[in-house]
Amino acid sequence: MNRPPVTAAGAEELNKELERLKKEERPKIVKSIAEAREHGDLKENAEYHAAREQQGFCEGRIQELEGVLSNAQVIDVAAVGAANAGKVVFGAWVELEEVESGETIEYQIVGDIESDIKKGRIAVSSPVARALIGKEEGDIATVQAPGGIREYEIIEVRYA
């Protein structure tokens, strides 16, 4: 069985979301359904149908999180970093400079479920992450992007 990797911090965030959904969102939705039922005919009750739809989304996310967390391989970034000093590995923060434009960007390589580009977290399965894994500071990583080939110089690798 393939166990998806997740950072310890990512697993903690996912657990917090799961607890919030179970302890806060689920009871609110149940209450909304009960209130909507009191309004009478369920066939033409928009509030009831909206609450049931919201319940479906909530329960689906709960199942997804429980499944991921039960199968996930939680990886301690600090331990991985200590063993691979200076190398790009799962969980590392990588500062990159695009060779052509000189623009710098920073990413953390994380599991698919915890990736969030707005927070600078890219999935280990992404083309950029695959090009970076195994490289060291000063190396050039070549990425096949939809807009063509891009080259990035690895400025700094850290494990926070």
Image: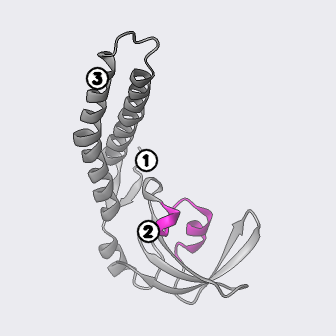
Residue at screen point 29% across, 39% down = 25
Q: Residues within 10 Å of mark 1 (few under 14, many from 20)?
A: few
User: Which amino acid is tagged 3?
Assistant: Glu
For residue 18, the mark is none
Q: Disc 3 marks which residue?
A: 35
Q: Disc 1 marks which residue?
A: 2
For residue 90, the mark is 2
**Whole-Å distance between the Cαs marked 3 and 1?**
43 Å
In front of the other: 88 or 29 = 29
Question: In this figure, which colouring scheme has been used for the structure?
Answer: one colour
Q: Earlier in the sequence, mark 2 or mark 3?
A: 3
Please give the range of residues in magenta. Answer: 116-134
Give yes or no for contact between labels 1 and 2 (Cβ–Cβ under 8 Å): no
Residue 123 appears in the figure: no
Q: Earlier in the sequence, mark 3 or mark 1?
A: 1
Residue 146 on image: x %, y %: 74, 62
Q: Image quadrant for the C terminus?
A: bottom left
Q: In terms of secondary structure, where does tag 1 sit?
A: loop
* Placement of 84 over or under 65, stated as above or below: below
